[in-house]
């Protein structure tokens, strides 16, 4: 039983970890952070050091959606995963939908994804306060 819970929670963690790669803004901000940190050590970069990830953003996002579906299967069949983490992962996936395919709707997707993320954070905090 514990092994199944750990296995399914790893799918949730993996889904959330991979999903952020689909969002351009997140990748762009990480690149800017890397440039800023390297500049503290005297290393100056021009351009974006992680731009190569833009080519694989859609496949990473698709893998994240597949892992979320697997996580949802385990949640509904075994009830062994925190629903708060699933809500948070869904928000990250919705908010980081690759924009080249949904360029017209990216603001709506950000709002919906942000709602899920904020809801997940609020539920997480309230669960911790109750304990």
Image: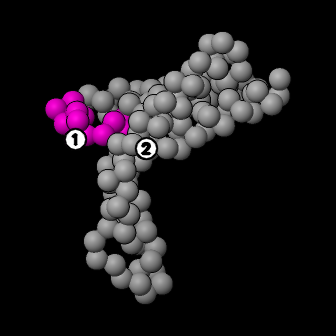
Using residue 112 as the reference point, say whether residue 41 is left or right of it.
Answer: right
Of residue 25 and residue 128, the one placed in the foreground of this image is 25
Of residue 22 and residue 40, the one placed in the foreground of this image is 22
Disc 2: which residue: 60
- The extreme left residue here reads 104
Task: Report the residue at 41% width, 39% height from top.
Answer: 61
* In this view, 61 is above or below 42: above
Task: Report the residue at 53% width, 38% height from top.
Answer: 16
> In which quadrant is the C terminus drawn?
top right
- In reply to whether residue 10 is colored magenta, the answer given is no
**Are discs 1 and 2 less than 8 Å apart at CB?**
no
Task: Report the residue at 67% width, 24% height from top.
Answer: 81
* In this view, 39 is above or below 26: below
The image quarter containing residue 121 is top right
Circle 1 SS class: loop
The image quarter containing residue 2 is top right
Q: Which residues are magenta?
A: 95-106
The image quarter containing residue 79 is top right
Disc 1: which residue: 100
Task: Tell me if residue 120 can be seen.
Answer: no
- The extreme bottom residue here reads 42
- In reply to whether residue 102 is colored magenta, the answer given is yes
- The extreme top residue here reads 77
Give the x, y percent position of residue 20.
44, 44
Task: Tell me if residue 65 can be seen.
Answer: yes
Task: Report the residue at 39% width, 43% height from top.
Answer: 59
Q: In the rendered structure, which disc, 1 or 2, sits on the residue that comes first in sequence?
A: 2
Circle 2 SS class: helix
Give the x, y percent position of residue 53.
37, 56
Give the x, y percent position of residue 95.
36, 35
* In this view, 4 is above or below 40: above
Of residue 74 and residue 113, the one placed in the foreground of this image is 74
């Amino acid at each position: 039983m514990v092994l199944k819970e750990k296995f399914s929670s790893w799918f949730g963690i993996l889904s959330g970890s991979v999903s952020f790669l689909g969002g351009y803004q997140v990748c762009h901000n990480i690149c800017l952070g890397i440039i800023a940190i390297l500049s503290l050590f005297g290393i100056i970069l021009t351009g974006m050091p992680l731009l190569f990830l833009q080519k694989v953003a859609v496949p990473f996002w698709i893998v994240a959606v597949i892992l979320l579906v697997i996580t949802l299967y385990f949640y509904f069949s075994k009830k062994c995963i925190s629903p708060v983490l699933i809500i948070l992962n869904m928000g990250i996936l919705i908010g980081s939908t690759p924009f080249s395919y949904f360029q017209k709707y990216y603001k709506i997707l950000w709002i919906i994804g942000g709602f899920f993320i904020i809801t997940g954070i609020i539920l997480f905090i309230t669960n911790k306060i109750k304990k």
